[in-house]
Image: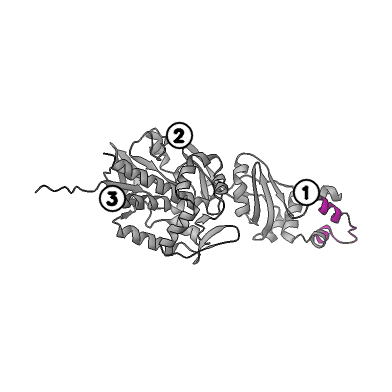
Amino acid sequence: MTSNIFPARRGVVIGAGPAGLMAAEMMAAAGLSVTVCDHKPSVARKFLMAGKSGLNITKAEEHTKFLNAFTTAKGPLEPILNSFDAPAVQGWAEELGQNLFTGTTGRVFPTVMKASPLLRAWLARLSGNGVELKTRWRWTGWDEGTPVFDTPDGMHHLPADVIVLAMGGASWSRLGATGAWALPLRDAGVDIAPFAPANAGITMKWSAHMGAHFGAALKGIGLKSGTYRSRGEAVISARGLEGGGIYTVSRGLREGHPLMLDLLPDQTRETLAEKLAKPRGKMSLANYLRKTLKLDVAKIALLQEMARPLPGDAVELAKLLKALPVKHAGLRPLDEAISTAGGVKFDAVDDGLMLRARPGVFVAGEMLDWEAPTGGYLISACLATGRWAGQHAAAWAHRD
């Protein structure tokens, strides 16, 4: 009797971060024999690092607002994010045994506030579905359409019916995202936007007196750079200003817009001017600001650093407090940025995220040219694009 059973088609995923693992899960679920290759000794290093401060997996907010966070990439990402939205991400994590909670700002976290339990459960499920994992396998390009890897046992060819690339951006290279994939893709005719830092701190050349304030937080401030606005926190460090508030407006800084801070966003300029019109007496200006406006010492120090000598006129001083221009030396280097702008342009892929220049090769995660602020958007979109690419890769493998 002739058998109707044929070997499963092979899918190869290059990159074992959240986008790559999600692509592998979708491909295995569709019946492909899946191998995931990563050049590091262990998987999902950036994912685990993000989880050290509490793994923010998504943002629970109105969906249109969620989509708008992706700014210029909203159009191509919208169908992908619609298919795996914030509630779906939460459901996926709960299926992996993770209890979740939503913070006051809408950020969603595992109750354990770390990534390792979720990753262990995910890897166990992938293994149970037959997904093979190869570490210390560094992709070097293609040999007549077959991906080639530098492995501990030498160069290795891994034939595949379909491939998903999910090697991350070009920041935090020590965790594996080096951007080295750009060269072989360009050689293959793929259009790639230049890499740039996203969600990055800024470099400051502080005067000596600011040393006493390193590590202090500027809490509850307003930040603005171009069309980008934030209400949050920034931390004064020896290198500059860091933190979620700065990261949210860093795109505006990269585009060349000035950075303006509102040190007292809950009070109007008129209210501040009225308070500042009261006699100062023999108090120093710092004490006067502290007692009259309840301005903390870190904010006073930054105000003086940026605008000394401060104006004596109450109206002019109130203007400064509401719109303090920050003199800085640019964004921190790309390798220090939380995420990467640039990458494979959406024009270079079809609606299923397959490379137009390389049929059968799909792209997911931060390799694509999109960016979003921190706060759950990054991981959520990596998972969604990985899922989308994996599903379309499986359909392409089974097309005949």
Residue interval drawn in magenta = 270-288
Question: Which kind of residue does numbered mark 2 sit on?
Answer: Asp
Q: Is residue 177 visible?
A: no
Q: CA distance from mark 2 to mark 3?
A: 29 Å
Label 2 or label 3, whichever comes before in sequence order: 3
Tag in front: 2 or 3: 3
Label drawn at residue 347: 2
Question: Which kind of residue does numbered mark 1 sit on?
Answer: Leu
Q: Which residue position holds label 3?
A: 31
In the shown orientation, is residue 316 left or right of residue 343? right
Q: Position of residue 52 (x, y in %)?
A: 50, 62
Helix, strand or loop at disc 3?
loop
Q: Is residue 286 magenta?
A: yes
Colour mode of the rendering: one colour
Helix, strand or loop at disc 1?
helix
Q: Which residue position holds label 1?
A: 320
